Amino acid sequence: MLSFTKESLKELLKNRGELSISIYMPTVKAGKETEQNPIRFKNLLKDVETQLNERGFKSQKIAQFLRPAYDYLEDSINWQYQDEGFAMFLADGYFLDFKLPVKCEEIAFVGDRFYIKPIIPLINSSQQYYLLTLSLNGARLFICSQYDITEMDIPGLDQDMNQALNYVNTGREVHYHTQLTGKKGVPAAIFHGQGFGLEDIKEDIAKYFHIIDNSVQNFLQNENYPLVLAGAEYLVPIYRETNSYAHTVDGGILRNPKEMDLKELHERSWEIVEPLFRKAEISDIKKYEDLSNTNRISGEIREILPASVGGKVDILFTAGDLHLWGRFNQEENSVVVHTERGPEDEELLDLSAFNTILNGGKVYVLDKENIPSGTLVAAVYRF
């Protein structure tokens, strides 16, 4: 089973034909509740069968077309190692399944293209950053996105200060630990060693961090992802003085990393970088607002959908938590909106997003209240 990437989306956009099936559902990752996963998937396959029947497909053709999906259903191993969500895409000679790192809506979609709206946020949120945890017992470097955190294997980072400075068995070893002091429980370092004063210790920490920085810099080289620092409050400023990586962000997690598990480190580091990654979204919303008295914007699906097909849409904002069903007649360039989903209906928001991305535009999937038009969709036109 694959993880979803930008390349995955490109593959889905290329596949258009008579019949394409998209299935999305939330999944249970572990425990007895994983038994719900195949049951939910089977129900969605029944929904697909109903939609195919409504389109006039014969039972034999339906069974043949869905055979890969039913084979997948019957393999129990597939359902034991899921993530937060699951997606499957099926067409003639085409079968892909993905683990998704977020909960997604439960939907089965049959059309001449794949349904992509639930996975667009994964692409927009795939910006990566680094997290460096600091202590005198060693450092760790992680590469992260909004949904993932993975430790990198870098030689030398796991050395403690005595090892890195060759103080082991020399009589110059420094022994250190932390304790909570003060009313706010601020960690303070306690050092033990012969002939060492506080300034000597700071010098040694700086030397140690210079070695750490060299290892990190040699690994990152020409990267430009943001780097978040995490370490005790007295350590992070010392590291900043030795740091040579140009894309280190201000602030950081000022706490001993050993007091946090990976989940907390990931969550707290994402809180620091999220505003950096949201700058483009905020800027594009402002662009829409600045063009409010021009013909360069629209909040009407009957205008936006034909414009997206014609390559006119530069930026699209669409509601991820709601649907808009109807029909699009490409020959007449007309849109009909239905109050409820009917047989062979298109999800018009998704179709607009599909064509916007296909034609090189940018798409944001947001909650309805964040759409700048106040409707379910908004667009900034190229011209």
Image (cartoon, rainbow, N blue to C red):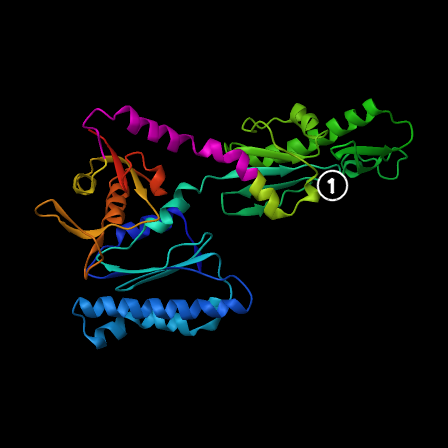
Tell me, yes or no, if residue 266 can be seen here: yes
- The region drawn magenta spans 269-298
Between 149 and 161, the one lying in front of the other is 149
Looking at this view, name the residue that lies furthest to the bottom.
60
- Using the image, determine if residue 137 lies above or below residue 38: above
Q: Is residue 68 left or right of residue 20?
A: right
Quarter holding residue 356: top left
Q: Is residue 133 left or right of residue 27?
A: right
Q: Is residue 327 left or right of residue 255?
A: left
Quarter holding residue 227: top right
Looking at this view, name the residue that lies furthest to the left.
332
Q: Which residue is mark 1?
A: 159
Residue 19 in the image: state x and y as whole percent: 22, 62
Between 67 and 296, the one lying in front of the other is 296
Residue 290 in the image: state x and y as whole percent: 29, 24
- Using the image, determine if residue 141 lies above or below residue 224: below
Magenta segment's dominant SS is helix
Going by the numbered disc 1, the residue's amino acid type is: Gln
Is 277 part of what is drawn in magenta? Answer: yes
Q: Could you classify mark 1 by the number of other residues whose Cα lies within 10 Å: few (under 14), some (14-19), or many (20 or more)?
A: some
Q: Residue at x 20, y 35 (%)?
A: 312
Is 42 part of what is drawn in magenta? Answer: no
Residue 225 in the image: state x and y as whole percent: 50, 34
Q: Residue at x 57, y 27 (%)?
A: 250
* Image quarter (top left, top right, bottom left or bottom right) of the C terminus: top left
Residue 97 in the image: state x and y as whole percent: 39, 60
Element class at badge 1: loop
- Using the image, determine if residue 24 lies above or below residue 225: below
Q: Residue at x 34, y 47 (%)?
A: 320
